[in-house]
Amino acid sequence: MAPRIQPPPDLPPGRELELPGRGTTWVHEAPGPAGAPTLVLLHGWTATAGLNWFATFGPLSRHFHVVALDHRGHGRGIRSRERFRLADCADDAAALADVLGVKRFIAVGYSMGGPVAQLCWQRHRDRVAGLVLCATSRNFGNSAPARAMWATAGGLGLAARVAPAEWRRNLYDRVLERRDDGSPLATWMIAERRDHDLRALLEAGHAIGGFTSHDWIGEVDVPTAVVVTERDTVVPVPRQRKLAAAIPDATVHPVPGDHTVCSVRPDLFVPALVEACRSVATRADLAVSS
């Protein structure tokens, strides 16, 4: 495991947390005001809780108890030889709430975290008080290029299962090194990604491509907000808006940024996220401090 590098100042310290019967994950937590509603933040593909949400903990924790975990195979998340499943990530989030003594929470998902949040509602309806879905969709594999990309990820995932661990690590390190521009933030971001399990990452890509909530997303019966990244070339804007239109009474919160806006332009993303979370909490009759 790579040595830790100083994280951004607003990111609360992380810690290992055992989810009984599931494994050990990594969690960042900001307590927020006494009695505040809980947000469980669910990060995107190839990110970590820290990478995806580092700029949001301070602003969100003025109103909420904020918890974020690394997903399976990502960062310091659960390690398993089982094939990566989005449903397992949703169950991990519910198990995390159990360990922390949280009865109900608002699931906040970004990109891949969007399907995880949707599955949290589908699989744990008594636990999810609301949804905030950011830069995400009901499905990701409708076009021929997308299907080809996700299928390729699946094939590479199978290859990674039999490839020597040292070979996988060297290949991944070479990819990361090309992204280092020498800035403290870039160096920290690369250090976060060094802990990924390449095999699980590739399997996660395949799982994203196979996900669809098209048949049941209209049944969502909790307050929902959709944060639309209006210059997104990864998750097309029409798909994000179709997601919002499919959920009864969902509110839309536009952000003038691309798919990396959460980390590259938090000044644009964070106000919309806070507004979306407050909107959901208010409609769910959860007490939110002003």
Image (spheres, helix red, strand yellow):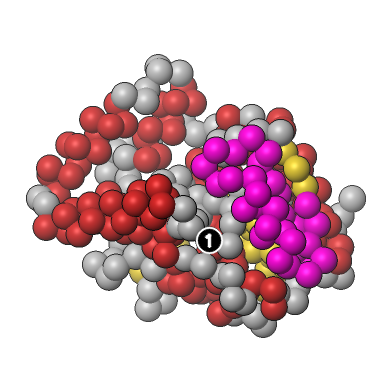
Is residue 217 rendered to the left or right of residue 139?
right
Question: In the rendered image, which quarter is residue 180 located in?
Answer: top left
Where residue 275 appears, as percent x and y from the top left, is 81, 48
Residue 251 magenta-highlighted: yes
Q: Which residue is drawn at 27% across and 44% down?
A: 1
Write the start and end of the magenta stretch as one range: 223-252
Q: Can you name the residue that lies furthest to the top here?
A: 182
Q: Does any portion of residue 33 appear in the rendered image?
A: no
Is residue 137 rendered to the left or right of residue 290?
left
Where residue 135 appears, as percent x and y from the top left, is 61, 48
Is residue 54 rendered to the left or right of residue 65?
left
User: In front here: 120 or 254?
Assistant: 254
The disc labelled 1 sits on which kind of residue? Asn
Find disc 1 in the rendering and name its residue: 139
Where residue 209 appears, as percent x and y from the top left, is 42, 59
Where residue 146 appears, as percent x and y from the top left, is 42, 50
Q: Residue at x 44, y 26 (%)?
A: 186
Residue 39 magenta-highlighted: no
